[in-house]
Image (cartoon, grey):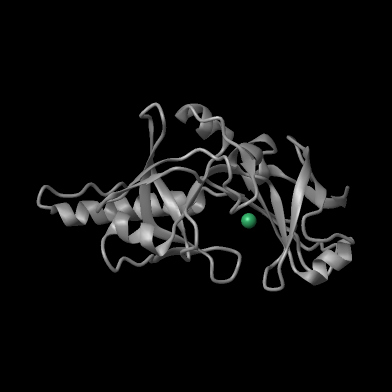
Amino acid sequence: MLQVPSLSTDRASVERLVREILRDRWVGSVPSFREPGKQDGPNPLVVNVSARHVHVTPQDLETLFGPGAQLTVLKSLYQDGEFASEQTVNLIGPRNRMIPNVRILGPTRDYTQIELSYTDGIFLGIDLPLRISGHHEGTPGGVLVGPHGAVNLSAGIIRAQRHVHMSPVDAAHHGVSDGDTMKLRIDGPCGVSFDNTVVRVHPKVKLEVHIDTDEGNACHLSSATHMELIRA
Ligand SMILES: [Zn+2]
């Protein structure tokens, strides 16, 4: 039976309850695909949907959340050391439209960047450029608003190009190098092949594809039956 808070429930309890419910919703709402029991290479292929998010510099974090602010972990991500933080900000675009509660991914970086889907861009009125993380030349800016202050960015809003993180071992297995593109084939009721999946090689990463929510919805990742990376 649903437990209804009594009239004596104080505000802090209600806020805690709402936070817990929202946390469960958010953590459970990001699809992931890992084919059970099958492995075509030295490491399992994992595909994860990157929901809209923000990366921030330590300086911008302090502007948004106050002096000395630190990111705190809500949920660890698949890559070691990366996490969804408890901190969120509101994003305001050129038409004064706002996307609330955009999550910050940690740790902090040496640039502030906002990664949105094309659907988000249409809502905000921004013609999003397709970019690899960190490439901000000619990208639009916007305003981030936190509980302590706001940051007015002149650039840094992108639609992240779909990509696959690979260690040198996985790159050698597939015969590809950093910057190459591959085809990501996803089978299932809404099967799709994604061209131009950029290979990003780094010695410390686990094999993982990142697609955004538009792509994850297009292939309905949670009903996928098989997937593979094909050398272009
Ligand atoms: Zn990524």
> Residue at image x 68%, y 68%?
205
Q: How many marks?
A: 0
Left or right: 109 in relation to 193? left
In the rendered image of this protein, does residue 226 appear above or below residue 206? above
The quarter holding residue 138 reads top right
Residue 188 sits in which quadrant?
A: top right
User: Foreground residue, 138 or 170?
Assistant: 138
* Left or right, 43 with reference to 18: right
The residue positioned 37% from the left and 57% from the top of the image is 60
Q: Where is residue 51 in the image (x, y as percent from the top left)?
A: 53, 46
Ligand 1 quarter of the rendering: bottom right
The residue lying toward the viewer, choosing from 86 and 16, is 86
Report x, y in % for residue 200: 72, 59
Residue 176 coordinates in the image, percent (x, y): 86, 59
**Front residue of this view, candidates 48 and 98:** 98
Going by the image, does 152 lie left or right of 187?
A: left
| Residue at point 82%, 49% (across, down) | 182
Q: Please indicate whether residue 180 sits to the left or right of residue 200 in the image.
A: right
Q: Quadrant of residue 185?
A: top right
Point out the residue furthest to the left here: 8
At horizontal 48% and vertical 66% (from top left) the residue drawn is 107
